[in-house]
Image (spheres, grey):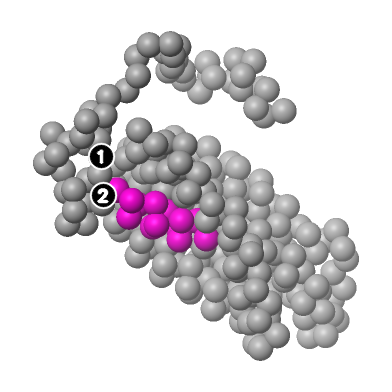
Amino acid sequence: MAEDTKLFGMKAESGRWIFIVLGFIINICLGSVYAFSVFKVPLQKWFADTHQVTVGSIEGNLPFMIFLGFFAILMFFGGRVLDRLGPKKIGIIGGILVGLGWILAGILPTIWPSIWAVVVTYGMIGGGGVGLAYGGPIAVAARWFPDKKGLAVGLTLAGFGGSPFISAYVASALIKAVNPLNTFIYMGIAFVIIVILLSLFLKFPVTGWKPAGWAPKTTGVAAAAELTTSEMVKTPTFWGLVG
């Protein structure tokens, strides 16, 4: 029963708001990859000054470009396994990969002085981790807020979209103080701790749970269709969204 469910020591209707806060903070960490522009020029300078390696403008953008690709691919995979693994496990796995990607981005270039070292770590490993962890907080918010789904998901995603406004300033200050590679390491350590710790609290409600006194509207709304992946990619709606 809805009135018997407790979250964080409170009635579920009140405690569920904690999931919004947790998801918002997790998404701040995940969305920090969008602050890569802060790293680009310092990285180019570091390669030139330390290893006499020239990194051009297009090459300098490769880590972020590869990140976007791996983010999209692993986000699809993460969505497929989310129900099976649950938001806690997928968040922990994603958090480990995100932190590992950032940390290795600060270490590998000292061994392999090439922008491809950052592509592999920040772009592939970190991007894959973001893709995996991204869906968990959103799905948790949506399932705990069937009555306020748009608000809950929007507030959770605000952390991802607004992250660069925070992380860019933090990264910029650290880069000036300790160089770009150490900044990757410090921020990666922070991300792995924060994302894993907060993901431990993520969980879905039991099947059929709904807020006390709330009932879904059943009139005037078309029934949602459940489609397999192969069926979904054949619909005009899917290709309209992709395009």
Q: List x then y, in percent, for residue 89.
A: 34, 51
Residue 231, relative to residue 178: is it above or below? above
Residue 240, relative to residue 185: is it above or below? above
In terms of image quadrants, where is residue 117? Answer: bottom right
Residue tagged 2: 14
The outermost residue toward the bottom is: 177
**Sequence-first disc among 2 and 1:** 2
SS majority, magenta: helix
Q: Secondary structure at mark 2?
A: helix
Q: List x then y, in percent, for residue 238.
A: 61, 22
In terms of image quadrants, where is residue 107? Answer: bottom right
> Between residues 124 and 203, which one lies in front from this camera angle?
203
Q: Quadrant of the C terminus?
A: top right
Q: Is residue 82 left or right of residue 30?
A: left
Q: Are marks 2 and 1 in contact (CB under 8 Å)?
A: no
> Between residues 177 and 184, which one lies in front from this camera angle?
177
Give the amino acid type for the residue marked by disc 2 in the picture.
Answer: Ser
The outermost residue toward the front is: 213
Q: Is residue 20 left or right of residue 74?
A: left
Residue beneath the point at 78% across and 85% down: 50
Residue tagged 1: 205
What's the magenta region?
A: 16-28
Specify few, some or many for label 2: CA neighbours under 10 Å numbering under 14, 14-19, or 20 or more.
few
Q: Quadrant of the N terminus?
A: top left
Residue 48 in magenta? Answer: no
Please indicate, yes or no, whether residue 91 appears anywhere in the rendered image: no
Q: List x then y, in percent, for residue 4.
A: 11, 41
Give the amino acid type for the residue marked by disc 1 in the picture.
Answer: Pro
Q: Secondary structure at mark 1?
A: loop
> Between residues 147 and 126, which one lies in front from this camera angle?
147
Whole-number angstrom distance, CA of label 2 to CA of label 1? 14 Å
Residue 21 in magenta? Answer: yes
